[in-house]
Image: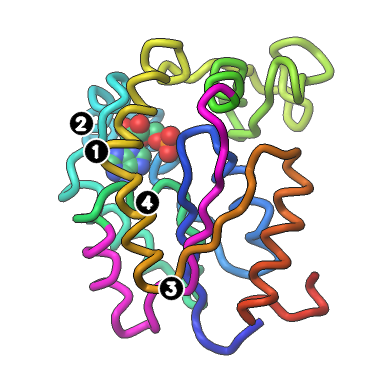
Amino acid sequence: MSASKTYLIFLGPPGSGKGTQSRMLQDKLGIPQISTGDLFRYNLKNKTELGLLAKRYMDAGELVPDEVTIRMVEERLSRSDCAHGAIFDGFPRNLHQAVALDEMLQDEGGVSLAPLLLVDDSEVIRRLSGRRVCRSCGAVYHVEFKPPKIDGVCDIDGGELYQRDDDKPETIKHRLYVYYRQTSPLVGYYFAKGLLAEINGNRPPDEVQQALIQTLAERHLLSETAT
Ligand code: AMP
């Protein structure tokens, strides 16, 4: 791994595999995944003020206000496990957040790379509508592509599997709309900085991971031995 800090920004529509891929990379890069969606869901589960505020936006498939989101990310980045960098999943989600992140990282070397997971809309809808999540450990399943051994029960810790409220059909469509309207301009933003890396995400997770690792190695963000 390079001596400088590494900050990856995963781009792509909801359901494109950002969470899966960023979690798979954590150990290889030795830096944590920061998922703003997971942070909001954690707060919601624990009924914090932040969680209750975020809930109405999440239920509607809308973005939580920038001020709240940016403050939460700043706090998360200040923790010691981010000393060597972080892998962002679901942040930034619009240009304002991207500029705020650049400011946060200006003394840390800035964003290293923005992998964009390209996935067809029909595939996104299929993935999200079949997604199930463990209530206790957060492991992700799919009724068709990755079913648990026992229906509705997590293979890892026996927790109950549930469908996220925002994975219901009407909200999925609205989240896609919000992605194209608010988040997709970030593709141009990172492209202009020479930081965009397009990855075909219409493939099984292991193949996508392999492609990512190759891209990171080519950009000297991962030692050859880790590939
Ligand atoms: P995700 O798990 O990334 O699909 O996020 C679930 C929901 O959390 C989104 O639909 C938003 O309501 C909220 N959320 C997650 N990340 C952000 C962000 N960076 N800015 C605003 N809202 C967010």
Rendered view: 83 above or below 185: below
Q: Name the residue under label 2.
A: 53
Q: In which quarter of the image is ligand 1?
A: top left
Q: Is mark 1 on a helix, strand or loop?
A: helix
Q: Quadrant of the C terminus?
A: bottom right
Tag 2, which secondary structure? Answer: helix
Mark 4 falls on what kind of element?
loop
Which mark is in front, 1 or 4? 4
Q: Position of residue 96 (x, y in %)?
A: 19, 55
Q: Quadrant of residue 190?
A: bottom left
Which numbered mark, 2 or 3, is in the foreground of this view?
Answer: 3
What's the amino acid at mark 2? Answer: Leu
Residue pointed to by mark 4: 91
Q: Residues within 10 Å of mark 4 (few under 14, many from 20)?
A: many
Q: Mark 1 and mark 2 in contact (Cβ < 8 Å)?
A: yes
Looking at the picture, tell me which residue is in the foreground, 21 or 120: 120
Question: What is the distance, in whole Å, between disc 2 and disc 1 at their CAs?
Answer: 5 Å
Name the residue: 64% across, 47% down: 200
Q: What stretch is highlighted in magenta?
A: 98-122
Seen at 74% across and 16% down, the residue is 144
CA distance for labels 4 and 3 = 19 Å
Distance between mark 2 and mark 3 Cα atoms: 36 Å
Dots 1, 4 in contact, CB < 8 A: no
Amino acid under disc 1: Leu
Q: Residue 50 carries which label?
A: 1
